[in-house]
């Protein structure tokens, strides 16, 4: 019986070698497991990385239509609020801002007209003709100004840009859901433009100029503020706007629907003017904005968002081909 439980030295050495081999295999398996867990990210890690990589309106990559921009076009005509804290509901401070701005501008128009009348020796007819001429020329220049503003905020900057950050984010984000603007009330829609075109710049202008210049730039500022409302009308159907709006569009006094719809075709490289749109054909035909983009690129190496959306546009611009390419030519 005792012999049944006895082991020879050779058998003991064999079992020891087997035990060591099994330990080595186990250690290798554990090492491979640890290596795989270290190199293969978990679902939580992947989700965190995607969140970190996603762009927002505060980033330089905030360009609707560019992969990874952080903006996507919502389906079903849903409104898309881009700027954090923004709302489609009109707030009291927005009403106060707009009311104060237009009250101040009305005062500037009244006092400057009176100053013009005094300089004309009380000749009301002459003063009225001059006022109309100033109004007309300011309306045309304001259309040009709206195009320059629209082009600049569509193509440069982001939500962190000083002073203009919220306007830049709103304009660029507008491309993701253009119909959102139609759900905004008047004050909610235009109040942001009351900052760059409000009382402060007009106080400075009136302080260093006479009544004629003050009248001209007051009309200019009013038109720039109203441009966002004209813009809103261009996104609404004929049955959704008051009758006078359709009359203004038919007369060419405000931007029409079809010309502005051309702007909303990627890469959003033309038809920037949104007051009457009368300057668009001339600006796009001669490639004014492509020329400016080329000069900016040569100056500091910054590419416009339109270039980022369409590399072929960048190549044409760098060759000095500034004219806007039509949709037929793109095809």
Image: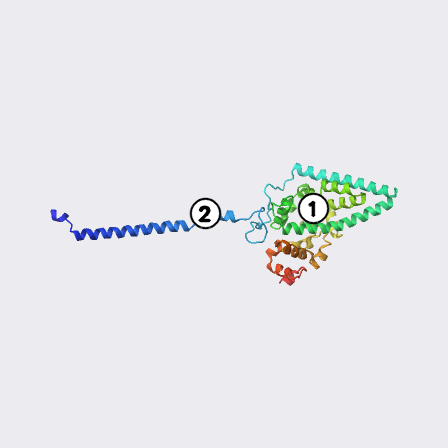
Asked whether 204 or 59 is in front, the reply is 204
What x and y, as percent, mark residue 291? 67, 57
Label 1, residues with CA under 10 Å away: few <14, some 14-19, many ≥20: many
What x and y, as percent, mark residue 153? 65, 49
Task: State which quarter of the image contains the C terminus.
Answer: bottom right
Give the secondary structure at mark 2. Answer: helix
**Which residue in the structure is indicated by mark 1?**
229
Residues under numbered marks 2 and 1 in contact, where contact means CB atoms less than 8 Å apart: no
Residue at 24% x, 50% y: name it. 19
Instruction: Tell me which colouring the rendered structure shows.
Output: rainbow
Q: Residue furthest front?
A: 299
Q: In which quarter of the image is residue 271?
A: bottom right
Q: Quadrant of residue 95?
A: top right
Give the secondary structure at mark 1. Answer: helix
What x and y, as percent, mark residue 49? 49, 48
Circle nearer the viewer, 2 or 1 = 2
What x and y, as percent, mark residue 250? 74, 52
Vertical relation: 329 (above or below) 304: below
Asked whether 33 or 74 is in front, the reply is 33
Question: How many marks are shown on the rendered structure?
Answer: 2
> Is residue 132 visible from the viewing direction of this image?
yes
**Which residue in the structure is indicated by mark 2?**
45
Label 2, residues with CA under 10 Å away: few <14, some 14-19, many ≥20: few
Q: Residues under labels 2 and 1: Cα distance?
A: 45 Å
Query: Which disc, if any, is residue 250?
Result: none
Instruction: Identify the mark nearer the N-term, 2 or 1.
Output: 2
Asked whether 228 or 246 is in front, the reply is 228
> Is residue 266 visible from the viewing direction of this image?
no
């Amino acid at each position: 019986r005792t012999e049944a439980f006895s082991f020879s030295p050779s058998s003991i050495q064999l079992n020891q070698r087997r035990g060591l081999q099994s330990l080595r295999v186990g250690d290798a398996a554990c090492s491979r497991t640890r290596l795989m867990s270290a190199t293969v990210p978990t679902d939580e890690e992947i989700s965190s990385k995607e969140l970190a990589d996603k762009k927002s309106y505060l980033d330089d990559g905030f360009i609707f239509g560019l992969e990874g921009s952080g903006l996507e076009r919502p389906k079903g005509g849903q409104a898309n609020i881009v700027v954090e804290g923004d709302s489609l509901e009109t707030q009291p401070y927005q009403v106060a801002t707009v009311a104060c701005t237009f009250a101040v501008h009305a005062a500037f128009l009244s006092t400057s007209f009176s100053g013009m009348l005094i300089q004309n020796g009380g000749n009301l007819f002459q003063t009225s003709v001059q006022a109309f001429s100033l109004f007309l020329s300011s309306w045309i220049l304001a259309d040009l100004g709206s195009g320059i503003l629209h082009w600049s905020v569509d193509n440069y900057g982001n939500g962190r840009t000083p002073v203009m950050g919220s306007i830049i984010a709103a304009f660029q984000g507008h491309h993701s859901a253009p119909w959102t603007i139609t759900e905004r009330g008047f004050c909610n829609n235009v109040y942001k433009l009351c900052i760059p075109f409000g009382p402060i710049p007009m106080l400075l202008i009136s302080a260093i100029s006479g009544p004629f210049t003050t009248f001209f730039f007051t009309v200019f500022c009013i038109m720039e503020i109203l441009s966002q409302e004209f813009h809103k009308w261009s996104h609404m159907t004929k049955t959704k706007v008051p009758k006078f709006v359709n009359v203004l569009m038919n007369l060419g006094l405000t931007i029409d629907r079809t010309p502005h719809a051309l702007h909303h075709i990627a890469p959003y490289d033309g038809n920037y003017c949104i007051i009457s749109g009368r300057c668009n054909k001339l600006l796009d035909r001669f490639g004014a904005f492509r020329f400016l983009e080329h000069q900016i690129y040569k100056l500091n190496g910054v590419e416009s968002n339109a270039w980022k959306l369409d590399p072929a546009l960048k190549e044409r611009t760098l060759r000095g081909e500034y004219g806007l390419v039509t949709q037929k030519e793109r095809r």
